[in-house]
Amino acid sequence: MIEAFGASDPGCVRANNEDYYLIEPSLGLYLVADGMGGAQAGEHASRLAAETVRDLIRDNPGIRSNPSGAVPDQLVNAFVEANQRVMRAAEADSAMEGMGTTMVAALERGDELVIASVGDSRAYLFEHGRLRQLTEDQTWVNEVGRRLGLEEAMLKNHPMRHVLTMAVGVSDQLRVHSYQMQPLPGVQLLLCTDGLHGVTSQEQIEKTLASRDSLETKCRELIASARAQGGPDNITAVILKNS
């Protein structure tokens, strides 16, 4: 059985919050999205994409119990449909032009979790006191800079460090990464935007998740730690615990 809690905060610099998250226990769906775009476009993109995935999962009631292995494809297909809907919404309204969103989701299938991601919102596994990143960032730093052999110290300050190579709503050719895992009892899964993982150290995240506090308290502490580091971006965290 999965226990979950999520929280979001605009941070210390941004006036609005373009992040969006969903916790849908009845669907076994947990999702975090980080919108981008001028005016209110980022907020619209993240919400539209997240709710599209939710609606498609809800409208396929057999998806969670399907033993055929089709669930990863179903989750990926939901991301693809979300991509199309965000693009159509942007085309229909000039105020929404250029909007998009990152997105990471976890979906229960029996005793397994299927994870899908686009962009740089991440899923982490916390087990035996250690945090392990499960998803792969679709960013210039990860897909270009590191492959060129640039040193990590240089990448941290590179002018391209914030550039995404993929996001929902920006291209017909969406690349979705998908993963499957079977979490053991007691492990925690963290879904978060880069307002958290790009600001708060891994050591601090590990310390927070290792505590005996409730999931709500842990979420609040993670957000507080990012704000204490200046909170330059919106901050969102969803923690899942396998009981």
Image (cartoon, rainbow, N blue to C red):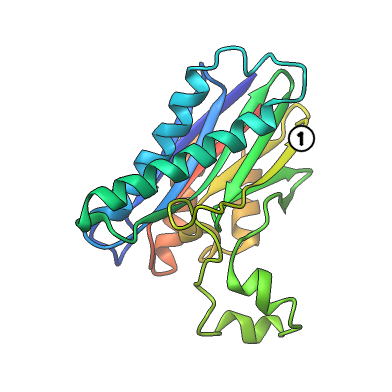
- Which residue is pictured at 48% across the width and 57% down the height? 171
Dot 1 lies on which element?
strand
Amino acid at dot 1 = Met
Query: As drawn, is 12 to the left or to the right of 145?
Result: left
Quadrant of the image containing the C terminus: top right
User: Residue 159: x, y in percent?
Assistant: 50, 84
Where does residue 35 sit, x and y in percent of width and height? 38, 53
Asked where in the image residue 10 lies, by quadrant, the reply is bottom left
Neighbour tally class for label 1: few under 14, some 14-19, many 20 plus, Cα within 10 Å = few
Residue 74 lies, with reference to residue 6, above or below; the image says: above
Name the residue tied to disc 1: 181
Which of 97/103 is in front? Answer: 97
Task: Tell me if 220 is positioned left or right of 204 in this view.
Answer: left
Residue shown at the point (56%, 66%) measured from the top left: 165
The image quarter in which residue 155 lies: bottom right
Is residue 224 visible from the viewing direction of this image? yes
Q: Position of residue 241 (x, y in %)?
A: 63, 31
**Which is more toward the observer, 11 or 173?**
173
Q: Residue at x 61, y 38 (%)?
A: 76
- Residue 79 sits above or below residue 71 on the image: below
Reply above or below: 182 against 105. Answer: above
Q: Tell me, yes or no, if residue 106 can be seen here.
A: no
Q: Quadrant of the N terminus?
A: top right
Q: Nearer the viewer, residue 174 or 209?
A: 174
Tell me which residue sits at (45%, 47%) in the image.
Answer: 33
